[in-house]
């Protein structure tokens, strides 16, 4: 039963991808909404529960939306989207350890003298 549900979901994603490729913006929106869960799961596996994971997921979904027209076969969408999510990166500032983030937060703001 669970396998059938998973297969049906994959089929739905493929159909949405094909419709989105054919210029139906409502299908692109639905596709991204339906893909968000797996994209977040993949990036959380890489970055953990962090700001880096959120940024990487947003980047992956943006790339998916931008590059969907380049996908040759809509039936390949699930694997293609997972590959994009797995290779997404995040900005270096999000890789600060709690120790460094605390140290930076304690750094005093420089005081500048007025030139007037």
Image (spheres, grey):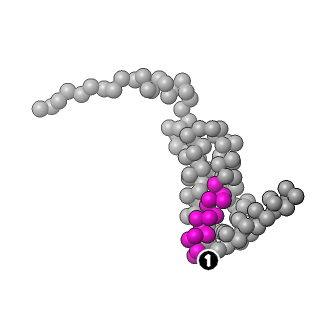
**Residues drawn in magenta:** 22-36
Instruction: Name the residue nearer the viewer: 90 or 55.
Output: 55
The C terminus sits in image quarter: top left
65 vs 92, nearest the viewer: 65
In the picture of the structure, the residue carrying the numbered disc 1 is 22
Instruction: Indicate yes or no whether the magenta region holds residue 28.
Output: yes
Percent position of residue 21, x then y: 62, 73
> Residue at 58% of width from left, 74% of height from top?
24
Q: State whether residue 69 appears in this view.
A: no
Q: Residue furthest left?
A: 116
Number of marks: 1
Query: Which of the 4 image quarters holds residue 99?
Result: top right
Residue 47 in sight here: yes
Given the current orientation, which residue lies at the most extreme bottom position? 22
> Which residue is nearer to you in this view: 69 or 24?
24
Dominant SS in magenta? helix
* Mark 1 closeness class: few <14, some 14–19, many ≥20 residues within 10 Å: few
Rendering coords of residue 49 (x, y %): 63, 38
Q: Residue furthest front?
A: 1
Residue for point 51% across, 26% down = 100
Question: What SS does tag 1 mark?
Answer: loop
Q: Is residue 54 left or right of residue 1?
A: left
Task: Kindly identify the residue that appears in the image at 67 percent across and 52 percent down.
Answer: 37
Q: Is residue 24 magenta?
A: yes
Q: Position of residue 4 (x, y in %)?
A: 85, 61
Q: Quadrant of the N terminus?
A: bottom right
* Residue at the extreme right: 1
Quarter location, residue 71 = bottom right
């Amino acid at each position: 039963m669970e396998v059938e549900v998973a297969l049906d979901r994959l089929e739905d994603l493929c159909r949405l991808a094909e419709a989105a490729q054919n210029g139906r913006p409502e299908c692109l929106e639905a596709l991204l909404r339906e893909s968000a869960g797996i994209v977040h799961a993949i990036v959380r596996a890489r970055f953990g529960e962090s700001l880096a994971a959120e940024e990487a997921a947003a980047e992956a979904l943006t790339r998916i939306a931008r590059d969907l027209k380049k996908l040759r076969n809509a039936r390949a969408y699930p694997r293609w989207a997972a590959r994009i999510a797995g290779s997404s990166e995040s900005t270096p500032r999000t890789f600060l350890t709690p120790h460094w983030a605390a140290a930076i937060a304690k750094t005093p703001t420089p005081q500048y003298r007025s030139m007037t």
